[in-house]
Structure formats: C-alpha cells, structure tokens
Image (cartoon, rainbow, N blue to C red):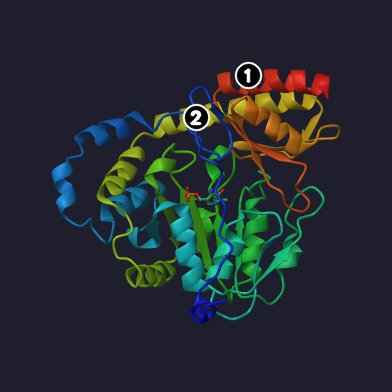
C-alpha cells in the first residue's frame, strides 16, 4: 500500500443497472418509462437556444421550483431541486444525518442508501422487512440518527399506507425522516401533506419515472421551509449550479401537461395489472406492486438462469445477487407490446424448465 492510500476516501460504489444500446432490445431493467416525455417537453426542447448556454443557469432554479410549487400547491420555499432524486437524496443525507447515531432503513431497499451512508461516514442499521416484504413500522420506534425509505419500496414495489408513514414520522420528531417517493405516481398516496404538519419530514420525488425524463436528471423534495433552507445551504457550499438551464426549462414544461401525465401513468398501471395476471398464470409469485415494476420469483425456476436466458434474447431485466432476494427478478413495466414479447418468452421457458 502506498502511503497516500491510507488517506483515500474509499467506497464500494453503487452499481447502476446496465444501459445497453442494442437494436431490437427490450429494456426492462432500470424502471424507465416506455412512453416519450409530454408533448409540451418536445415543444420546449425545440424552443431551446444554444446561445443561452453562454450564461450560468439560475442558481435558485426558480423557473422549476415555481412550477413545482404551483403544481403541487406548496410555497416555492418548500421546494428543493437537484440532478435527479439521487442528487437530492445525497444532499439530504449530507445535510440531515450528522448525529453520529445510526440512521435506519430497510434491509431490502434502494441500494444507494448504504452507499451514501458509507461515502459520508454515516453509521446505519438495516431493519428487516417481514416475510411479505413489508416494513415493520415498530422497528423505527427506537433511538436513531434519521430514517429513510422509499414508498413504494424498491425493488419490491410494496406500498405502505399514509397512516403508517405518519406514525413513523410522529415517533421520530427529533430526527429527519426522508420518504423517497420515486414511484408514488403509479398508484400510491403521497405523504406530501405531512410537510405542513411535521417539520421533520422530507418527501422526495423525481421526473425520471412517471414523467419519462430519466435522461434529463431532475429530482425534487418538499419539506418545511427551514429544512429546504438547510438543504440549499449545503448545496451552495458544494455546487451552486447543480441544475442546467435546459433541465430547469424542460422540467417546468413537463408539469404543464397533466392530461398526458395521467394518461401515461394510467397505461402503465393497466399494463402492470394485466401482466400480474399473466405471470401468476405461469406460476410466478410477487407482492402487489404499486410501482412501474414487478418483483417476481418462481418456485421451479432459478432467477439468475432466467435473467441470463432473457439477456441472450436481448430482453433486459434486473437481478440482484443479494441475501433474501437472489431468486427474484425486477421487471420494469414496458409497453404492452414489450410485455407481450417477454410473456411469450416466459411461456416457452416455463414449459421447458
Ligand atoms: N429512489 C429510488 C427508490 C429509485 O429506485 C431511484 C432510481 N434508481 C431513485 C431514487 C433515483 O432516481 P433519479 O436519480 O433518476 O431521480
């Protein structure tokens, strides 16, 4: 080991899903939306002028925070924005989790939480989900340095009720509770209303899933104005210009098209419910996902082998080689045609194996 190596901030990095780019592939591995962004986004895209890139973007991101505030009926100073919800969550970990006590999150959850905790040297303790992959809320009723979980959870898709969320927030009023709602628009009830009743809750959402804009990297959070101020203080101390000018403009445009948003979310939900029935008929089992993916297992089929077999056919799904979930696959809901191609393959595979 070289002497300087002992001073390195070493981390085991988060591993994002593959981003293959093959002709004819069916990409169901990173929970992207199969439908294009709203027509208002295409129009705003065409109006962008390269000459505007000469100037720095607005560090306060007002065009987007104003649009979000109007859309969600909150004050602009109750909104924080970032480069995808990953950036928002990372800033929130850095800002709020400094007590030295362990933060709490589920054992099966978004696999970035432990990575941020490690990179920021935040101690953490994982709380096991029950056998149905549900959060045991009482596990969050003990001294801790903060709480974070997705609702619906990922990669399980399981939604907890708003009253359960509220109980966890209520029991933890001495710390910040972050509710990561990356998938809330596919059938869940947001905890947004809690920000007006509790000053310790931060609700995080994203344009990557329900608004079909993963490539633009836009995330946001709602919270009490004091929390948002603390988040901005840390953001300005790190990088004042996190959001680029096109992202601010296109994000604001996306919010104008409520009808398109409802229609595409509705299509994904309808496809999800149909695919649930078809997968059940093939012997797959899964929880009642309220997200844009299903987390499935099969008594007679090894998930890893199926993942590899699908990949050969250029159908990409996500496999996690982790305790408790190493015989599961997470399958993003694509278009009806994509899901039909997947189901046709699975029908044959189940027959032969
Ligand atoms: N939270 C959860 C639970 C996720 O699954 C994802 C997607 N990887 C994110 C946050 C981050 O998404 P983005 O940075 O694209 O907003």
Quadrant occupied by the C terminus: top right
Relative depth, front residue between 70 and 274: 274
- The x and y percentages for residue 215 are 40, 42
Relative depth, front residue between 37 and 5: 5
Q: Which residue is mark 2?
A: 34
- The x and y percentages for residue 257 are 36, 34
- The x and y percentages for residue 57 are 23, 55
Could you say which disc has been placed on residue 26 in the image? none
Q: Is residue 83 left or right of residue 112?
A: left
Residue at the (51%, 82%) spot, across then down = 3
- The x and y percentages for residue 224 are 44, 66
How many other residues sit within 10 Å of disc 2, few (<14), some (14-19) or many (≥20)?
many
Residue at the (51%, 35%) spot, across then down = 20
Quadrant occupied by the N terminus: bottom right
Residue at the (67%, 25%) spot, across then down = 275
Q: Report if the beta carbon of the residue with label 1 is closer than 8 angstroms to ligand 1.
A: no
248 above or below 202? above
Choose the circle earlier in sequence order: 2 or 1.
2
Res. 23 visible in picture: yes
Q: Which residue is mark 1?
A: 340
**Which structural element holds mark 2?**
loop
Which image quadrant for residue 302? Answer: top right
């Amino acid at each position: 080991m070289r002497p300087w190596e002992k001073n390195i901030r070493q981390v085991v990095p988060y591993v994002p899903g593959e981003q293959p780019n093959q002709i004819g592939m069916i990409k169901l591995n990173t929970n992207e939306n199969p439908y294009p962004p709203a027509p208002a986004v295409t129009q705003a895209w065409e109006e962008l002028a390269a000459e505007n890139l000469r100037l720095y973007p607005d560090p306060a991101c007002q065009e987007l925070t104003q649009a979000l505030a109007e859309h969600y009926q909150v004050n602009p100073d109750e909104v924080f924005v970032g480069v995808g919800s990953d950036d928002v969550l990372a800033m929130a970990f850095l800002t709020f989790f400094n007590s030295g006590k362990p933060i709490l999150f589920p054992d099966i959850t978004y696999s970035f939480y432990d990575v941020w905790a490690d990179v920021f040297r935040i101690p953490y303790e994982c709380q096991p989900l029950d056998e149905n992959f549900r959060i045991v809320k009482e596990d969050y009723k003990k001294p801790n340095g903060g709480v974070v979980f997705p609702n619906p959870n990922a990669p399980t898709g399981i939604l907890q009720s708003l009253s359960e969320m509220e109980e966890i927030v209520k029991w933890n009023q001495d710390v910040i509770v972050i509710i990561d709602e990356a998938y809330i628009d596919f059938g869940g009830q947001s905890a947004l209303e809690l920000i007006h009743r509790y000053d310790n809750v931060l609700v995080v959402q994203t344009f990557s899933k329900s608004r079909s804009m993963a490539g633009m990297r836009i995330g946001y959070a709602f919270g009490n104005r004091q929390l948002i101020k603390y988040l901005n203080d840390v953001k300005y101390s790190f990088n004042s210009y996190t959001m680029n000018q096109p992202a601010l403009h296109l994000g604001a445009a996306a919010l104008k098209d409520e009808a398109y948003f409802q229609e595409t979310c509705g299509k994904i939900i309808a496809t999800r419910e149909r695919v649930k029935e078809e997968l059940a008929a093939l012997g797959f089992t899964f929880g009642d996902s309220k997200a844009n993916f299903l987390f499935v297992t099969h008594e007679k089929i090894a998930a890893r082998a199926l993942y590899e077999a699908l990949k050969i056919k250029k159908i990409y799904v996500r496999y996690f080689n982790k305790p408790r979930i190493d015989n599961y696959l997470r399958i993003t809901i694509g278009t009806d045609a994509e899901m039909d191609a997947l189901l046709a393959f699975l029908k044959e595979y189940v027959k032969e194996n």
